[in-house]
Amino acid sequence: MSTPTKAAEPQQMGKGIKFLFGGTAGMAATVFVQPLDLVKNRMQLSGVGGAKKQYKTSFHALASILKNEGVSGIYTGLSAGLLRQATYTTTRLGIYTSLFDMLSKDGKPPNFLAKALIGVTAGGIGAFVGTPAEVALIRMTADGRLPLEERRGYKNVFNALSRIVQEEGVLTLWRGCVPTVGRAMVVNAAQLASYSQAKQILVSTGYFHDGLFLHFVASMISGLITTAASMPVDIAKTRIQNMKTVNGKPEYSGALDVLTKTIRQEGFFSLWKGFTPYYARLGPHTVLTFIFLEQMNKAYRHYVLHDDSASGGL
């Protein structure tokens, strides 16, 4: 009498594929939201040091950029944005999905606290890897607000990285690394954990089923939570990475110095300056990143692993 054969375990996606899909999803989303990132950075640098604000609102900023720099101006820094995604998002989503699968038992996902801890870990490591591209991105998007004689004039992200090393030293590529890593830990704990949790809660209501609409709603909820939690750290990061050294003295001594001076000179709620473009960027970027990631994962499982039993992503 023959013994019944045990059903074969479904094949798992390789870690390399998870890293590749994570970075590709982030890069694809960046192509759509780069103008919003530009406006967000310009808004956060407007009124630095108590100077007169250059932009009244996000729409005023966008209109001014289009008027003074043209349509191509709103895509300033795109090469740096893409490199940032290729480094930061590839690392953070690759690590997150790997740890997520590792801690899932019997098909059950990790609890919310575990998701948050995974997000913090993935975000911190990803941010360290992505800081050089982040520094280039901040500087390239900020350049157009300065008078011609004060602009850095980087041609592309590789020219920016090369010149930063030559003119300011290799360690400048990691300027603002501490607030960048801190911001990423906050963002990922909030974004990745809240996205997974929002999906579970929405599905449990019975009104949502796995698909694009579920991913969209969960992403927008995640984006709102993440924006409120991470903006003060993001402003500190942006200003440190864009600061210049005058007579051998930097504008800020650290993230706490930025926050203290910003509150004193511009008011407490200025820590959420640029909230609209930040959420308008983070919301759609979160939506597009997760939608691209879910669809790529789903297609890979279907066409390569021949497994239609699992949903596409996180």
Image: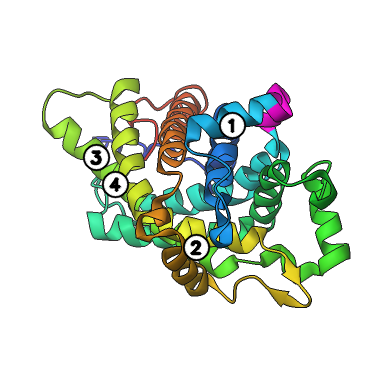
Tell me, yes or no, whether the two marked residues, 4 and 3, touch with CB atoms within 8 Å. Answer: yes
Say which of marks 4 and 1 sits in front. 1
Badge 1 or badge 3: first in the primary sequence? 1
Mark 2 is surrounded, within 10 Å at the Cα level, by few (under 14), some (14 to 19) or many (20 or more) other residues, namely many
Mark 3 is surrounded, within 10 Å at the Cα level, by few (under 14), some (14 to 19) or many (20 or more) other residues, namely many
Q: 86 or 165: nearer the eye?
A: 165
> Real-space Cα distance between discs 2 and 4?
17 Å
Kind of residue at disc 4: Ser
* Residue 272 placement (x, y as % from top left): 40, 51
Badge 2 or badge 4: first in the primary sequence? 2
> Real-space Cα distance between discs 4 and 3?
6 Å
Badge 2 or badge 1: first in the primary sequence? 1
- At horizontal 30% and vertical 46% (from top left) the residue drawn is 225
Tell me, yes or no, whether the two marked residues, 2 and 1, touch with CB atoms within 8 Å. Answer: no
- Mark number for residue 194? 4
Badge 4 or badge 1: first in the primary sequence? 1
Kind of residue at disc 1: Pro
Kind of residue at disc 3: Ala
Say which of marks 2 and 1 sits in front. 1
Is the N terminus in the top left, top right, bottom left or bottom right quadrant? top left
Kind of residue at disc 2: Gly
- At horizontal 64% and vertical 53% (from top left) the residue drawn is 134
- Mark number for residue 164? none
- At horizontal 31% and vertical 55% (from top left) the residue drawn is 115
- Mark number for residue 198? 3
- Mark number for residue 124? 2
Mark 1 is surrounded, within 10 Å at the Cα level, by few (under 14), some (14 to 19) or many (20 or more) other residues, namely many
